[in-house]
Image (cartoon, rainbow, N blue to C red):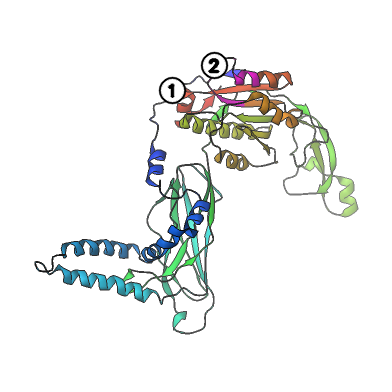
């Protein structure tokens, strides 16, 4: 059953932000492994001192270096201008700050970063950076001092938002915290380099040796399409022995056992005999043996990047919609990769599916026979399959996939991704088939 979306189109222009961002970072390694490889390489070791020197300057210090460079260019002709005096003073000011900062060590201290595990594409994520000083020996260095926190150089799709982090004043045995906000415009698992904290030299032009945190990981997950109704004919299949950890619901319930009472348990499930024997309230626990188990298949053979992003958001919306009901999303198939997943009914989390969808990339053309062969171990327990496919001519691999699934007794619903549906998803329109 191929279902085309019938909706009022919404106006929108495809964003070119991703392509421009990629071009802006074309010479910078994309992944953390590539960045580490560059640092260990010959060129990376050669430029490391220059990067370290530039990193020792504060924002004010970097601004002063730019001003010093401009003044130096104006003072090149020493016979016609006295600007070289100003240039000399500025150079001395920068070099003096760098020399003074070398002795300002941030000792017996740790820097930690906390961040949500997941953030949606385009939404702000907050990094909370905390600096803790251990109890120090009572000497001149044990006084409270100011710290500057700096974030890592972000990947091509990330940008810092909001004001710079507040300057911290941390004494011995104290902990200070500040926050930084960023936004990412591309999906995926992002490995960020360390956040750092350092003492600030007088005049605020340079920082001392930096203390680094551990690396940070953030899953940037796709948006969830606003799916409010699906054309899915739900069917149940018998699951001998039930499904472990499944919540109690449905028409066929078998007694699983007796367990201690927990607040919120139904009074009708109290087991009087166990309560009388042990002196502690206990309840009967049931196990359901009939379930609606759904497989979600996403065909990623889409050449148009905007259509692929919309299809991924639709897949997230389908999983979210189904997980709110009584169905179990048993498998999520992305391209030709089958992920065993049970979302909903207390068996998993929507976030797990979002993390899988965050890593989706375009794949070769769909091969129906190979896909069904990979799904074979799961077909006996599935009752319904939802397939998201790009628009294609009849008698294609999509038709063959639908036929093969129906031959195995499954209810197969194919959602066709086209330009109209993509616009509706981008516009946040309620999707109802």
Q: Residue furthest bottom?
A: 139
- Can residue 293 be seen here? The reply is no
**Vertical placement of residue 56 versus 181, above or below:** below
> Mark 1 falls on what kind of element?
loop
Q: Secondary structure at mark 2?
A: loop
Q: Nearer the viewer, residue 206 or 226?
A: 206
Q: Is residue 391 magenta?
A: yes
Viewed as shown, does residue 86 lie left or right of 368? left
Image position of 274 with respect to 393: above or below? below
Residue tagged 1: 9
Label 1: how many residues lie within 10 Å, few (<14), some (14-19) or many (20+)?
some
**What percent of the width, then of the height, locates residue 260?**
81, 50
> Which quadrant holds residue 317?
top right
Asked which quadrant contains residue 79, the reply is bottom left
Q: How many marks?
A: 2
In the picture provided, is 327 more to the left or to the right than 81?
A: right
In the rendering, at what x and y percent does residue 409 appear?
74, 20
- Range of the magenta residues? 387-401
Instruction: Name the residue at 61% across, 21% down.
Output: 397
* Mark-to-mark CA distance, 2 and 1: 22 Å
Residue that numbered label 2 is attached to: 393
Q: Could you tell me which residue is drawn at 52 percent across and 63 percent down?
A: 213
Relative image position of residue 159 (x, y in whole percent): 41, 49
| Magenta stretch: includes residue 216 | no
Image-quadrant location for residue 234 = top right
Q: Residue at x 75, y 37 (%)?
A: 248
The quarter of the rendered structure image containing the N terminus is top right
Image location (x, y in percent) of residue 349? 64, 42
């Amino acid at each position: 059953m191929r279902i085309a979306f019938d909706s009022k189109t919404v106006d929108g222009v495809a964003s070119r932000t991703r392509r421009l961002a990629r071009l802006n970072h074309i010479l910078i390694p994309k992944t953390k492994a590539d960045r580490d490889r560059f640092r260990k390489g010959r060129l990376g070791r050669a430029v490391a001192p220059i990067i370290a020197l530039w990193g020792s300057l504060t924002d004010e210090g970097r601004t002063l270096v730019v001003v010093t460079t401009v003044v130096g260019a104006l003072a090149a002709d020493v016979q016609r201008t006295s600007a070289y005096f100003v240039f000399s003073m500025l150079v001395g000011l920068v070099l003096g700050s760098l020399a003074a900062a070398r002795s300002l060590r941030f000792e017996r201290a740790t820097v930690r970063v906390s961040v949500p595990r997941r953030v949606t594409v385009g939404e702000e994520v907050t990094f909370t950076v905390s600096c803790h000083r251990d109890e120090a020996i009572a000497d001149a260095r044990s006084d409270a001092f100011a710290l500057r926190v700096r974030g890592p150089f972000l990947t091509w799709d990330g940008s810092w938002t909001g004001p710079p982090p507040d300057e911290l004043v941390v004494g011995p045995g104290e902990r200070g915290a500040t926050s930084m906000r960023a936004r990412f415009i591309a999906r995926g698992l992002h490995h960020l380099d360390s956040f750092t904290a350092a003492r600030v030299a007088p005049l605020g032009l340079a920082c001392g040796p930096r203390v680094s945190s551990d690396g940070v990981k953030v899953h940037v997950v796709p948006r969830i399409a606003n799916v409010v109704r699906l054309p899915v004919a739900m069917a149940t299949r018998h699951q001998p022995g039930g499904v472990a950890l499944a919540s109690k619901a449905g028409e066929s319930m078998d007694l699983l056992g007796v367990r201690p009472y927990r607040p919120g348990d139904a009074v009708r499930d109290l087991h009087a005999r166990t309560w009388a024997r042990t002196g502690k309230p206990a309840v009967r626990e049931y196990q359901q043996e009939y379930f609606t188990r759904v497989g979600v298949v996403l065909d990623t053979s889409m050449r148009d990047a905007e259509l692929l992003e919309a299809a991924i958001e639709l897949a997230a919306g389908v999983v979210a919609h189904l997980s709110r009901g009584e169905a179990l999303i048993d498998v999520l198939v992305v391209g030709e990769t089958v992920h065993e997943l049970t979302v909903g009914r207390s068996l998993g989390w929507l976030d797990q599916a979002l993390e899988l969808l965050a890593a989706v990339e375009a794949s070769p053309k769909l091969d129906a026979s190979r896909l069904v062969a990979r799904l074979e171990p799961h077909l006996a327990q599935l009752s319904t399959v939802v397939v998201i496919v790009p628009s294609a001519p009849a008698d294609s691999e999509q038709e063959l996939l639908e036929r093969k699934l129906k031959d195995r007794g499954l209810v197969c619903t194919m959602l066709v991704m086209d330009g109209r549906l993509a616009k509706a998803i981008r516009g946040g329109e309620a999707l109802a088939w």
